[in-house]
Image (cartoon, helix red, strand yellow):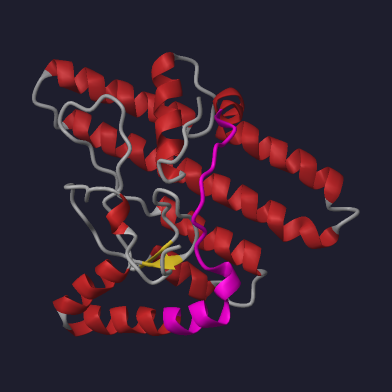
Amino acid sequence: TMDAGSSYEGWLPRDPGPTLWAEPFYDAWLANEGVDVRLRYARAQAAELAAARPYIRAGELIIGNNALRPILTSQALPFCTGMRLDGERLQEVRAWGGAAAQRADEIAAFWDVWSREHAAQRPLTCHASLAWERALTLGIDGLADDVRHWRDINVPARPAAAPWYEGLLTVLGGISAYIEAHAAVAEQAAAAAETPERRAELQSIAAACQHVAHRPPESFQQALQLFYLLFALGGHDSPGP
């Protein structure tokens, strides 16, 4: 078991892509103080998903990268999900000095208290084989409709479950926003493409992302794009047989 304050970066080689700093999870977490903890976490995670800063490498036909690298994050890594502190990022930001270092210290102090007081909610380290076929069959909006269906059945008898269902819907909205961010960056890349061939590829990628941000895939490209984005969000763990 890894310490919750570590960076978790030893699981995979470091991604050589760009990195940007912002703290959408931390800011949303503070903004939702007093909210049911399930919904509070969902809102913070959705805020981080919506704040994604995707980038596209040369020649990529299926995309899925995020340059955003906060100190406090819910971004999954292999075999690790949950709210955690990226200790390596913390040290990098502290080294910048000034206001950045002060903010880093604030986040570190928050984490030191929170992780000690909520040890049972520290990050999980596990394998997971998910029901990918449901996302591929229903799409993100279809999954949300399914959540609403079970919410309407279960919440009247168990009102305390309402924040759980609202949290699921909130995170699904964040996933749609995450995919839409990929569509937007592909459109921007297409406008700046140096060749007609690459422009066409990027336009196709943008259209695929825009489609699967809400609807089930209707082509192999769309299915592969949706699967990869969800696979990346899940920490690149256990794609199944």
> Residue at horizontal 17%, vertical 21%?
198
Position of residue 194 in the picture relative to residue 110 (left or right) = left
Tell whether position 145 is magenta. no
Tell whether position 113 is magenta. yes
The vertical placement of 112 against 48, above or below, is below
Based on the displayed image, in which of its 4 quarters is residue 203 positioned? top left
Position of residue 24 in the picture relative to residue 17 (left or right) = right
The answer to whether any part of residue 68 appears in the image is: no
Based on the displayed image, in which of its 4 quarters is residue 107 positioned? bottom left
> Residue at horizontal 19%, vertical 30%?
191
Based on the displayed image, in which of its 4 quarters is residue 88 positioned? bottom left
Q: Residue furthest right?
A: 157
The answer to whether any part of residue 22 appears in the image is: yes
Q: Residue furthest front?
A: 1
Q: Which residues are magenta?
A: 111-132
> Residue at horizontal 89%, vertical 53%?
156
Position of residue 192 in the picture relative to residue 157 (left or right) = left
- From the viewer's side, name the closer residue of 60 and 183: 60
Q: Position of residue 6 (x, y in %)?
A: 35, 68
- From the viewer's side, name the closer residue of 179 and 123: 123
The vertical placement of 151 against 47, above or below, is above
The vertical placement of 69 against 112, above or below, is above
Q: Position of residue 8 (x, y in %)?
A: 34, 60
Position of residue 12 in the picture relative to residue 210 (left or right) = left
The quadrant of the rendering that contains the N terminus is bottom left
- From the viewer's side, name the closer residue of 224 and 163: 224
Q: Position of residue 20 (x, y in %)?
A: 23, 58
